[in-house]
């Protein structure tokens, strides 16, 4: 049962925000696991700010809420972190619920954007320049590549604190719209998760049967009932299983691997 109540809003100073950023920058890819992904560093990074906003009991309750699945491009993740701290600074009873909805809805799109820009575009362009210069016996390309990465890192660092302050200003001036923001982010989060189920999960049934001249595939038949039927049912079963206290995500991964191998071997899964 939640003991959270609405309090007077507070604004965090830049010194506290820098503490949060330093923690996040140096820890965001640590304690990486299949259950919570990047949530461990997230919770630890927020602590200096949360101590100024809430009591220890409230922080413990909020940490439990935040210690759920989160996975985003690490550089864009710090922008989401600042946005969530802006929401937490309202000290509204439902602030964490809103912040989690924002986090869930933004992590997917920003992960794709970050991967495309930082992991693909930047290394490709700068690497090509550095490689060509190296062939010519010059170190200039290497220094250009290093400078480009440092510049991009600096941009994200400089953007982070303004994201917090703009977030506070927006939420303060639009406080009556906060509930609508929660609803919108919840809907967007559901859409993102639905897209992930359809595109990243791949469960296909291999059973076929023949009646006369007609050969029917079970997978095609079920997909006419619900598109991506195997994906949807698999995710639904796993989500249902996670509702049991003794069931851990790590154990479910092993169960899925074993079941997939067995059902694939007998031809039930394609």
Image (tube, rainbow, N blue to C red):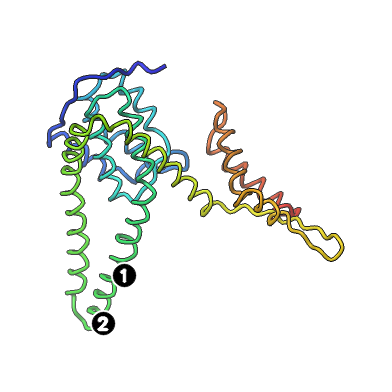
- 86 up-or-down from 34: above or below: above
In the image, taking residue 172 as reference, residue 104 lies left or right, namely: right
Please indicate whether residue 224 sits to the left or right of residue 151 in the image.
Answer: right
Task: Name the residue nearer the viewer: 54 or 226.
Answer: 226
Distance from Cα at disc 1 to Cα at disc 2: 16 Å
Q: Which mark is residue 124?
A: 1
Q: Residue furthest bottom?
A: 136
The answer to whether 131 is drawn above or below residue 236 in the figure is below
Q: Secondary structure at mark 2?
A: helix
Where is residue 135? Give x, y as percent.
26, 82
Q: Nearer the viewer, mark 1 or mark 2?
A: 1
Q: Secondary structure at mark 1?
A: helix
Decide which of 93, 154 is in the foreground and name it: 93
- In the rendered image, the vertical position of residue 44 relative to residue 32, given as above or below: above
Q: Position of residue 228 (x, y in %)?
A: 60, 52
Q: Indicate the quadrant containing the C terminus: top left, top right, bottom left or bottom right.
A: bottom right
The residue that appears at 65% across and 54% down in the rendered structure is 204
Quarter holding residue 245: top right
Q: Which residue is the site of mark 2?
A: 135
Q: Residue at x 31, y 70 (%)?
A: 124
Residue 48 is drawn in which quadrant? top left
Q: Earlier in the sequence, mark 1 or mark 2?
A: 1
What residue is at 38 percent from the left and 35 percent from the top?
A: 183
Dot 2 surroundings within 10 Å: few (below 14), some, or many (20 or more)? Answer: few
**Relative horizontal placement of residue 208, taking residue 188 as reference (left or right):** right
């Amino acid at each position: 049962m939640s003991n959270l109540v609405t309090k007077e809003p507070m604004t965090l100073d830049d010194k506290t925000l820098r503490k949060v950023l330093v923690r996040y920058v140096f820890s965001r890819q640590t304690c990486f696991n299949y259950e919570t992904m990047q949530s461990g560093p997230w919770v630890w990074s927020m602590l200096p700010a949360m101590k100024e906003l809430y009591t220890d009991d409230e922080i413990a309750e909020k940490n439990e809420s935040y210690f759920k699945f989160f996975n985003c491009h690490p550089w864009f993740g710090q922008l989401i972190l600042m946005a969530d701290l802006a929401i937490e600074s309202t000290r509204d009873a439902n602030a964490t619920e809103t912040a989690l909805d924002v986090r869930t809805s933004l992590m997917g799109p920003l992960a794709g954007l970050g991967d495309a820009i930082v992991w693909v575009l930047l290394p490709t362009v700068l690497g090509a320049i550095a490689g060509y210069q190296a062939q010519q016996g010059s170190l200039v390309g290497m220094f250009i590549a290093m400078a480009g990465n440092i510049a991009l890192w600096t941009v994200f660092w400089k953007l982070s604190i303004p994201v917090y302050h703009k977030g506070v200003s927006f939420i303060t001036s639009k406080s009556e719209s906060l509930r609508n923001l929660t609803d919108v982010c919840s809907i967007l989060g559901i859409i993102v998760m639905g897209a992930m189920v359809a595109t990243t999960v791949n469960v296909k049934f291999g059973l076929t049967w023949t009646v006369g001249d007609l050969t029917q595939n079970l997978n095609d038949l079920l997909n006419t009932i619900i598109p991506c039927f195997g994906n949807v049912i698999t995710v639904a079963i796993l989500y249902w299983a996670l509702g049991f206290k003794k069931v851990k995500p790590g154990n479910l991964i092993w169960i899925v691997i074993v079941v997939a191998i067995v059902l694939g071997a007998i031809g039930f899964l394609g």
